[in-house]
Structures are given as C-alpha cells and as structure tokens.
C-alpha cells in the first residue's frame, strides 16, 4: 500500500512538472510572477486531466472484466447454492417465530380468560 502511494505521488507530480516544463518552454520569458503561477496551475490542471483519462481507462478495463466474467460466476453460485440455502433457513426461522408467537398469544389468552373468570366470580 505504501509503495502504491509513492508510485501515485511520483506519477502525478511527474506529469505535473513535465507539463509545467513544456508550458514554460513554449514561452521563453515570463512577464510576472502571477503568470508563472497561472502556468503552474494550468500544468496541474492538464496533469489531472491526463491522470483522470488513465484512471477512466483502468476503471473501464476492470469493469469490463467484472461484468463479463466475475459477476456471472458469482451470480451463478448465488442462484444455485446460496439463495436456496438462505431461503430454507429463512423459512425455518419464520416458522419458529410464528409458532413462538402463537404460543405466547395462546398463553396470554388463557391467562386473560382465567383472570376474567375470577373477576366474574368476585362480582357474583
């Protein structure tokens, strides 16, 4: 990871100073320091445009590989093995909680009936 950061740093600033030197070579004399700063930022802008073009090409390359080969492979595995397994587990969990809820509901209904019957006996 550290080597990647160093490589990207060298790549970006290499492009920047290469463009900056090309811009300076086009005009032999600089009139003001502001002109120098403008040229420097113009070089940075051109560098970022080139770097973005490179990263877009890299992105499209890997996206094409992902869409063509990797995603269909994992989709196939998901549809054949993982999804039916998860669906089966979900159905078991659903029936367990459904039965548990029914038992809890029946328990409270039973308690409610006995309390109501005791209350009726007190009133009589």
Image: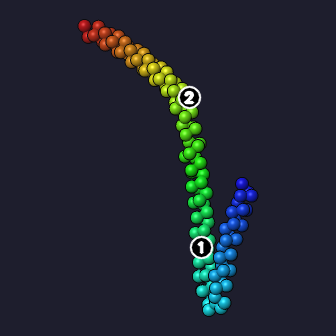
Residue 108 appears left or right of 84:
left
| Residue 113 visible to an observer of this rendering | yes
Mark 2 lies on residue: 81
On the rendered image, what quadrant is the C terminus found in? top left
Secondary element at tag 2: helix
Q: Is residue 116 above or below residue 3?
A: above
Q: Which residue is nearer to you in this view: 9 or 22?
A: 22
Q: Residue at x 69, y 66 (%)?
A: 11
Q: Is residue 124 above or below residue 46?
A: above
Q: Which residue is nearer to you in this view: 27 or 45?
A: 27
Quadrant in the picture for residue 61: bottom right
Image x and y of residue 22, in percent? 66, 80
> Number of callouts in the render?
2
Mark 1 lies on residue: 46
Crowd tier of the residue under label 1, counting other residues whose Cα lies within 10 Å: few below 14, some 14–19, many 20 or above:
some
Q: Which residue is nearer to you in this view: 94 or 55?
A: 55
On the rendered image, what quadrant is the N terminus found in? bottom right
Residue 120 appears left or right of 61:
left
Disc marking residue 86? none
Quick one: which residue is furthest to the front in this view?
A: 68
Image x and y of residue 73, in percent? 58, 38
| Residue 93 visible to an observer of this rendering | no
Colour scheme used in the picture? rainbow
Crowd tier of the residue under label 2, counting other residues whose Cα lies within 10 Å: few below 14, some 14–19, many 20 or above:
few
Image x and y of residue 119, in percent? 30, 12
Q: Is residue 16 above or below residue 114?
A: below
Residue 114 appears left or right of 9:
left
Mark 2 to mark 1 CA distance (whole Å): 50 Å
Image x and y of residue 13, in percent? 68, 70
Quick one: which residue is furthest to the right in this view?
A: 3
Q: Residue at x 66, y 73 (%)?
A: 16
């Amino acid at each position: 990871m550290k080597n990647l950061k160093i490589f990207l740093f060298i790549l970006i600033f290499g492009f920047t100073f290469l463009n900056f030197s090309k811009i300076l070579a086009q005009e032999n004399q600089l009139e003001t320091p502001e002109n120098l700063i403008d040229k420097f930022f113009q070089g940075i802008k051109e560098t970022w445009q080139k770097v973005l073009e490179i990263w877009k090409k890299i992105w499209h390359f890997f996206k094409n590989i992902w869409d063509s080969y990797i995603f269909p492979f994992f989709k196939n595995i998901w549809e054949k093995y993982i999804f039916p397994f998860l669906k089966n587990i979900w159905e078991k969990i659903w029936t367990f909680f459904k039965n548990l809820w029914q038992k809890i509901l029946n328990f409270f209904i039973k308690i409610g009936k006995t309390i109501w019957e005791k209350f009726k006996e007190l009133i009589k």
